[in-house]
Image: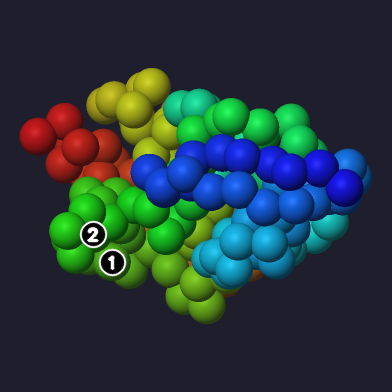
Amino acid sequence: MATVSLTVNGKAVSADAEADTLLVDFIRENLGMTGTHVGCDTSQCGACVVMVNGYSIKSCTMLAVQAEGADVTTIEGLETDGQLHPMQQAFHENHALQCGFCTPGMLISAIDFATKHPGANEDEIRKGLEGNLCRCTGYHNIVKAVQAGSAAMKG
């Protein structure tokens, strides 16, 4: 058992975890934040994507102890003062979600992509989100939402 200390959504947290505990399980079970989803257990779907030190990662591929001292942002940390993040707002306005299971990981990935590739075209967005699977939407509205969210993030 190890004590893992990190910053999650701007707050310092600390909890005990087994050495083989995945970050996604640590977030959900030890910290009680269930917005990050476990979808496939094989790192294929992207439902577990969170930001770690400014990079989107699949939290099912990282051990909690590897995140020691890291700054982690989950879906619960996107809104500010009750206001949706611009990408969340864009997903809402462009009907870019249906069942919502992929949405937390898709949003984190979209924010990371838009930050690094502002003004990306449709093909670039589709390629940039390849690690996130959605079984409901067909991606058309997701791409529109990422374009709109990217523009809103620029101000």
Left or right? Give the position of 3 relative to 21: left
Indicate left or right for 106 with 2 as reference.
left
Residue that badge 2 annotates: 84
Say which residue label 1 marks.
92
Q: Is residue 113 visible?
A: yes
Residue 128 in sight from this viewpoint: no
Q: Amino acid at mark 2?
A: Leu
Give percent across and percent down for residue 86: 22, 49
Q: From the top left corner, tell me how far across and down residue 106 is, in percent.
A: 50, 51
CA–CA distance in space, label 1 to label 2: 10 Å
SS under mark 1 = helix
Q: Secondary structure at mark 2?
A: loop
Q: State the residue in front, 70 or 13.
A: 13
**In the displayed structure, does residue 154 sit left or right of residue 63?**
left
Hey, what amino acid is under mark 1?
His
Contact (Cβ within 8 Å) of mark 1 with mark 2? yes
